[in-house]
Image (cartoon, rainbow, N blue to C red):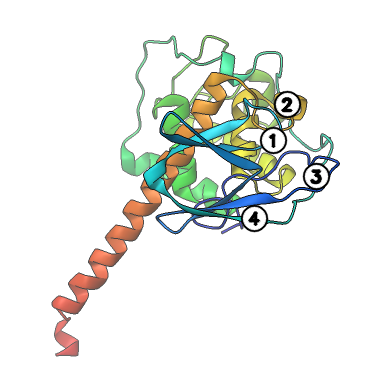
């Protein structure tokens, strides 16, 4: 599994371009043991905002009870300039403006079939299947025929130009769509040095918007989207850990016949 700056492997937020004057960043520890990094934090109306850049609009929010503490850390490296290796994307119609599925065709896969497709793509790109499932839930709700008002299609809501650059011929074909969307997310994570929050912001709002605002763009839809995917990923990982603990406890309570 790749070393994503996220709940199961490290920090969720990384910094945008560092300021010229030296100043410390903050490492945030959640009560579930996960860590993330931000430029600073502020409490607003009972919730904690974690900022990813100098802009007052570049943040995601958590409840106070979700955060265990903060500590200062050295400044991170600056973000690189836009990478030519990124797939072609239509930044003129960012996903933040493409939300709202308008088709009425419901083509949901069974949970097992969807997970099998996501697991295969995850193995190919060393991405957690629960991360991919969280993104699919936010993008399409698991509907393989979903179409946004701007024309994004399928399970991972690929715009036509992005799909074409990824070799996806039919965005409504689940395996093709997931393979393309996973490859795109993988490319974004590589570009943003495994910073999940920035990769998700670019997936939703476009890499151009992330570069323009030096962090998560100030689009309400994009901020909500990033937080939604991260929270869902967090929920799934916690559920997975809880199931593992229950399995261990059950095996200790009821030993197998061979161990008696």
Quadrant (top left, top right, bottom left, bottom right) of the C terminus: bottom left
Residue nearest the observer in this picture, 51 or 129:
51
**Residue 89 image position (x, y, % from top left):** 71, 24
Inter-mark Cα distance, 4 to 3: 17 Å
Left or right: residue 89 versus residue 44 is right
Q: Residue at x 57, y 11 (%)?
A: 150
Which quadrant would residue 158 be assigned to in this image? top right
Residue nearest the observer in this picture, 215 or 191:
215
Between marks 4 and 1 in the image, the one whose residue lies nearer the viewer:
4
Q: Residues within 10 Å of mark 1 (few under 14, many from 20)?
A: many
Element type at mark 2: helix
Q: Which residue is mark 2?
A: 213
Circles 2 and 1 in contact, beta carbons < 8 Å: yes
Q: Residues within 10 Å of mark 2 (few under 14, many from 20)?
A: some
Between marks 2 and 1 in the image, the one whose residue lies nearer the viewer:
1
Q: Which residue is mark 1?
A: 53
Inter-mark Cα distance, 2 to 1: 8 Å
Q: Which residue is mark 3?
A: 78
């Amino acid at each position: 599994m790749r070393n994503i700056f996220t709940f199961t492997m490290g920090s969720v937020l990384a910094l945008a371009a560092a300021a010229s004057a030296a100043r410390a960043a903050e490492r945030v520890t959640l009560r579930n043991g996960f860590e993330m990094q931000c430029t600073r934090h502020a409490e607003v109306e009972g919730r904690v905002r974690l900022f990813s850049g100098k802009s007052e609009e570049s943040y995601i929010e958590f409840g106070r009870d979700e955060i265990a503490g903060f500590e200062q850390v050295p400044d991170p490296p600056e973000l690189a300039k836009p990478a030519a290796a990124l797939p072609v994307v239509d930044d003129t119609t960012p996903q933040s403006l493409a939300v709202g599925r308008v088709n009425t065709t419901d083509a949901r896969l069974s949970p097992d079939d969807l997970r099998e497709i996501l697991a295969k793509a995850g193995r190919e790109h060393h991405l957690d299947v629960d991360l991919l499932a969280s993104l699919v839930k936010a993008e399409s709700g698991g509907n393989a025929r979903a179409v946004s008002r701007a024309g994004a299609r399928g399970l991972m809501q690929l715009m036509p130009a992005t799909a074409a650059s990824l070799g996806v011929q039919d965005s409504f074909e689940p395996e093709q769509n997931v393979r393309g969307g996973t490859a795109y997310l993988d490319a974004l994570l590589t570009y943003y040095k495994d910073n999940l929050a920035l990769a998700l912001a670019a997936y939703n709002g476009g890499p151009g918007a992330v570069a323009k605002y030096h962090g998560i763009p100030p689009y309400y839809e994009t901020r909500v989207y990033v937080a939604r995917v991260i929270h869902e990923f967090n929920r799934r990982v916690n559920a997975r850990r809880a199931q593992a603990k229950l399995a261990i406890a059950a095996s200790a309570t009821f030993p197998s016949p061979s161990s008696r």
